[in-house]
Amino acid sequence: MNTTCDTLPSGTLTQEQAQARILAAIPVFDATERVGLRQALGRMLAHTVTAHIEVPPHRNSAMDGYAVRHADLASGQALQVIGSSFAGRPFTGSVQPGECVRIMTGATVPQGADSIVMQENVQRNGDSISISARVEPGEHVRHPGEDMRIGDTVLEAGRKLNAADLGLLASLSIGEVNVIRRPRVAFCSTGDELKSIGEPLQAGEIYDSNRYTLYGMLQKLEVEIIDMGVVRDTRKDVERAFQQASQLADVFITSGGVSVGEADFVGDTLKKLGQAEFWQIAVKPGKPLTFGKIGNCFFFGLPGNPVSVMAGFPLFVRPAILKMRGESAPTVAEYSAICTTPLKKAPGRKDYQRGICERDANGQWRVRSTGGQGSHILRSMSQANCFIVLPLEWGNVEAGTEVSIMPFEGLL
Ligand code: AMP
Ligand code: MG
């Protein structure tokens, strides 16, 4: 039988349905903070900036050359050089008929002069010059306010500030701006089997890797990161972690403990302290997802398997954080590629398999599987540079099939 969205087991959501529910629940963050200009890079501006001075503030030269009176040029007579105007050291006199001033780029155009002749078009003989080329009236003169005039809206509220914007603000002498506060994101790993780096392993224990993959993925989102360590599988420890996180953070992410195993207290605790929804999502890896809220803190409970964390995060957590930060379309680029290896797949879940993609000589994307797709095989994530995204209803994929890929670049 062909499995489609309509024939999913009841209570199971498609990835798109789960994403839509999450985004509907997440508000755009409006808390702001004041930061210095350099710290504002990449941040969302919280107010409109208008120019309170003109940029440039004075009439200045766009070229190294000579400042002249255009009316003098018709006769072809030589002009007397009466001084120099340097950037920051203007010539203070005024240019009379038959005179000119040596001028550098950015220097104030002296009174009386109205055009600049490039030095390449001038022959200098002692204190006078003759001009060999045609000069347009006003040529190479930059006017006050040509970049920004007083009262101009320079940057709109909601803009993500880039390098050029920092420069604009600096040229208006604005050293601090209000930006949307970064969401604070806390996370912990749950599991009695988990040890942190450097601790000796006892029988049955493994090292916690999820706190590091989560850290890496969160770092890309420019949030404030709060690492709450490993939390033991006891009601008391899980409850304490939830209470702490909900006081400290806007978003709390846990990994592990969301299945229906006997030591899985995450869901119970969330129900007790806040609101919880438990979803089975028709996506592989990472089927169960818990979404909820404690006070004003949004909660995401990801399954513990390392690959499930790395797939669940970009699909469900990342869009939520981007929305919080006010980014309008938190979409992820997908491309079509020829799959050069066969892929195993069962219908009924949308698969995010790990692939290695590259462009061939014709610019066509090709992708191959990293091999083992177990959700505990973190090396497959490390070797991969994209997800191969296979629709829910598909079964096994033959080599040569056109598939969708989602490059990790910019995503993970
Ligand atoms: P759970 O979701 O707690 O049932 O865990 C599913 C699988 O993921 C188990 O094999 C766990 O040992 C493993 N796992 C859970 N948390 C982590 C972690 N932080 N780092 C590495 N593996 C983990
Ligand atoms: Mg566990």
Image: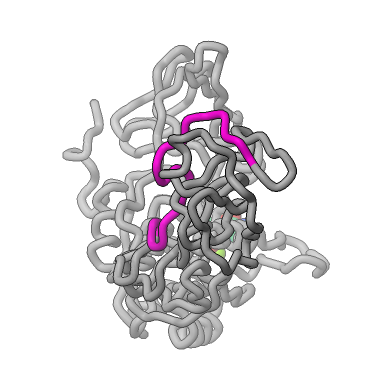
Placement of 187 over or under 120, stated as above or below: below
Residue 27 visible in the displayed image: yes
Instruction: Give the overall secondary structure of the magenta segment.
Output: loop
Residues 293 and 94: in front is 94
Residue 272 visible? The answer is no
* Residue 238 position within the rendered picture, expressed as x and y whole percent measured from the top left: 51, 80
Q: Residue at x 17, y 39 (%)?
A: 6
Where in the image, quadrant-wise, is ligand 2 located? bottom right
The answer to which image quadrant residue 147 occupies is bottom left
- Of 158 and 1, nearer the camera is 158
x 67%, y 62%: residue: 208
Return the x and y of residue 223 as percentages of the image width and height.
51, 68
Position in image of residue 24 (x %, y %): 23, 63
> Left of 103 or right of it: where is 198?
right
- Nearest the viewer among 106 and 227 is 106
192 vs 309: above or below: below
Of residues 45 and 91, which is closer to you in this image? 91
Residue at the spot x=33%, y=32% of the render?
391
Is 141 a magenta residue?
yes
Is 240 contained in the magenta span?
Answer: no
Judge left or right: residue 131 versus residue 265: right
Residue 342 located left or right of residue 346? right
**Percent coordinates x, y for residue 313 in the rendering:** 46, 55
Magenta extent: 129-147
Residue drawn at the location 51% of the way across and 11% of the way down: 362
